[in-house]
Image (cartoon, rainbow, N blue to C red):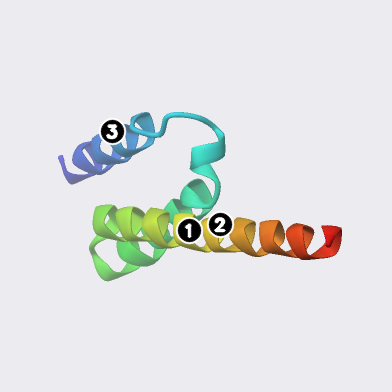
Amino acid sequence: MSRFLTVTALALALAGIGTAADAKGCLKGALVGGLAGHAAGHGVIGAAGGCMVGRHYANKKARAQQQGQQQGAR
């Protein structure tokens, strides 16, 4: 039953992603977080947290690249 809930929660989380661009970092983070969370007995929480952290780092990297391009154009 818990495996069903895990898969369902992950599917719902991924269904909420609008476009492929929004998924940057989330899928990799969810995979890593889900595996780490599974080892600790909290796979769904780990996947959700991993998705958020992955998105954060992907957005941070995109902002840094955008700033680098703007400074290079000056």
| Mark linked to residue 58 | 2
Mark 2 vs mark 3, foreground winner is: 2
Q: Secondary structure at mark 2?
A: helix
Residue projecting furthest to the bottom: 40
In terms of image quadrants, where is residue 73?
bottom right
Image position, residue 35 (x, y; %): 41, 60
What residue appears at the point 38 percent right and 35 percent down from the top-left corner?
14
Mark 1 vs mark 2, foreground winner is: 2
Q: Is residue 3 above or below residue 39?
A: above
Asked if the residues shown at circle 1 and circle 2 are in contact, with their CB atoms under 8 angstroms apart, the answer is: yes
Q: Is residue 27 above or below residue 14?
A: below
Query: Pointer 1: what residue?
Result: 54
Q: How far is mark 2 from mark 3, CA to CA? A: 21 Å
Q: Secondary structure at mark 1?
A: helix
Q: Amino acid at mark 1?
A: Gly
Q: Earlier in the sequence, mark 2 or mark 3?
A: 3
Q: How far is mark 1 from mark 2, CA to CA? A: 6 Å
Query: Pointer 3: what residue?
Result: 12
Apparent side of residue 23 relative to residue 51 in the rendered image (left or right): right
Q: Secondary structure at mark 3?
A: helix
- Camera-nearest residue between 31 and 58: 58
Q: How far is mark 1 from mark 3, CA to CA? A: 17 Å
Image position, residue 36 (x, y; %): 39, 66
Apparent side of residue 50 relative to residue 71 in the rendered image (left or right): left
What residue appears at the point 32 percent right and 40 percent down from the top-left corner?
10
Apparent side of residue 33 relative to residue 6 in the rendered image (left or right): right
- Camera-nearest residue between 69 and 33: 69
What residue appears at the point 49 percent right and 40 percent down from the top-left corner?
22
